[in-house]
């Protein structure tokens, strides 16, 4: 079976620096090995430990295997250090939200009145300790709010692993680059849980559309339609027990 480098590297302009990505033949050889499920980026991985500090890892060692012809002298050792994570910035702009299903607070005497809620957008990138929040759209009518708010996320991205890299003292932490966007109420006491949320995997983000009519949720890889909320249960009327007529006390 024949393989082409274009099958694995969709955007050629991102792989032009051989100092970061390595030689073309080395890259396609690694892709083929990964496609066949034979090895990962290394043959074996072991954790370094010290008897003085049991249970505390002191680092790790990655062991590789190279096979050379018996009659030829092996080449010079090559640098097998993994490429360094690339500093990137993610920009998210939220213009508005429409038809957000909010908590109903319509008075009984006004069944046709519009629902008013304070809406706010939260966005959190995997690995960030706290979520970023937008300004509050006060008194949003029927779940429609305008924001025009921009979020900025700066992170290091490891292209070979397709993960976000968070440097650590002993070992770097690799996380899936997932962005969580949620619509919440400006007053947590009204609705502590978000009205709506969405997880976006930045590795397989769909191409943007210029018109809203051409977009649908199924475009997002791995998207699953959330189950509908359970129907409201009607209160069960408790049957009142008939009280026995009082009898006069015995003398």
Image (cartoon, helix red, strand yellow):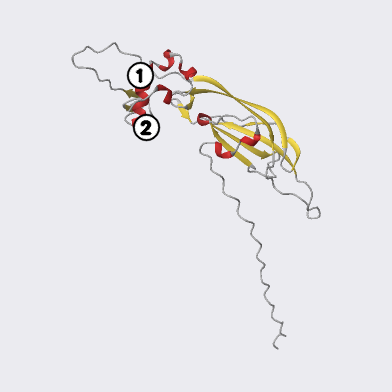
Q: Is residue 70 visible?
A: yes
* Helix, strand or loop for disc 2: loop
Q: Read off the residue under disc 2.
A: 55
Q: Residue at x 38, y 28 (%)?
A: 57
> Which residue is rendered at x = 53% and y = 29% of the image?
202
Quarter-of-image position of residue 234 = bottom right
Residue 30 vertical position relative to residue 139 in the rendered view, above or below: above
Give the mark, 1 or 2, whose residue is nearer the N terminus. Answer: 1
| Most foreground residue, 39 or 135 | 39
Quadrant where the C terminus sits is bottom right
Mark 1 or 2, which is nearer the eye?
Answer: 1
Query: Regarding mark 1 in the picture, which secondary structure is present there?
Result: helix
Q: Are marks 1 and 2 in contact (CB under 8 Å)?
A: no
Residue at figure coordinates x 53%, y 43% from the top left: 224
Residue 174 drawn at (x, y percent): 46, 28
Q: Left or right: 153 with respect to 75?
A: right
Q: Nearer the viewer, residue 122 or 15?
A: 15
x, y percentage for residue 222? 51, 38
Taking the view exactly as shown, the residue that stands out farthest to the left is: 71
Q: Position of residue 24 (x, y in %)?
A: 38, 17
- Residue 132, placed above or below residue 191: above
Name the residue at the right extreme: 109
16 is higher (above) or lower (below) than 33: above
Q: Which residue is mark 1?
A: 26
């Amino acid at each position: 079976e024949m393989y082409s480098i274009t099958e694995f590297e969709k955007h050629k302009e991102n792989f032009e620096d051989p100092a970061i990505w390595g030689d073309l033949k080395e890259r396609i050889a690694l892709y083929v090995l990964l496609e066949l499920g034979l090895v990962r980026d290394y043959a074996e991985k072991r954790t370094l430990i010290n008897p003085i500090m049991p249970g505390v890892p002191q680092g790790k060692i990655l062991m590789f295997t190279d096979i050379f012809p018996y009659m030829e002298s092996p080449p010079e050792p090559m640098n097998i250090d993994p490429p360094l994570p690339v500093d990137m910035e993610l920009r998210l702009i939220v213009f508005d939200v429409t038809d957000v299903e909010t908590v109903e607070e319509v008075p009984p005497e006004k069944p046709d009145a519009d629902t008013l809620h304070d809406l706010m957008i939260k966005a959190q990138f995997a690995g960030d300790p706290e979520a970023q929040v937008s300004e509050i759209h006060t008194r949003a009518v029927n779940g429609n709010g305008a924001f025009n708010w921009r979020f900025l996320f700066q992170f290091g991205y490891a292209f070979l692993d397709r993960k976000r890299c968070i440097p650590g003292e002993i070992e770097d932490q690799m996380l899936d680059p997932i962005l969580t966007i949620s619509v919440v109420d400006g007053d947590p006491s009204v609705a502590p849980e978000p009205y709506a949320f969405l997880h976006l995997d930045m590795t397989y983000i769909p191409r943007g559309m210029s018109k809203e009519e051409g977009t649908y949720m199924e475009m997002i890889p791995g998207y699953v339609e959330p189950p509908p909320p359970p129907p409201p249960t009607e209160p069960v009327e408790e049957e009142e027990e008939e009280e026995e007529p009082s009898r006069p006390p015995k003398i």
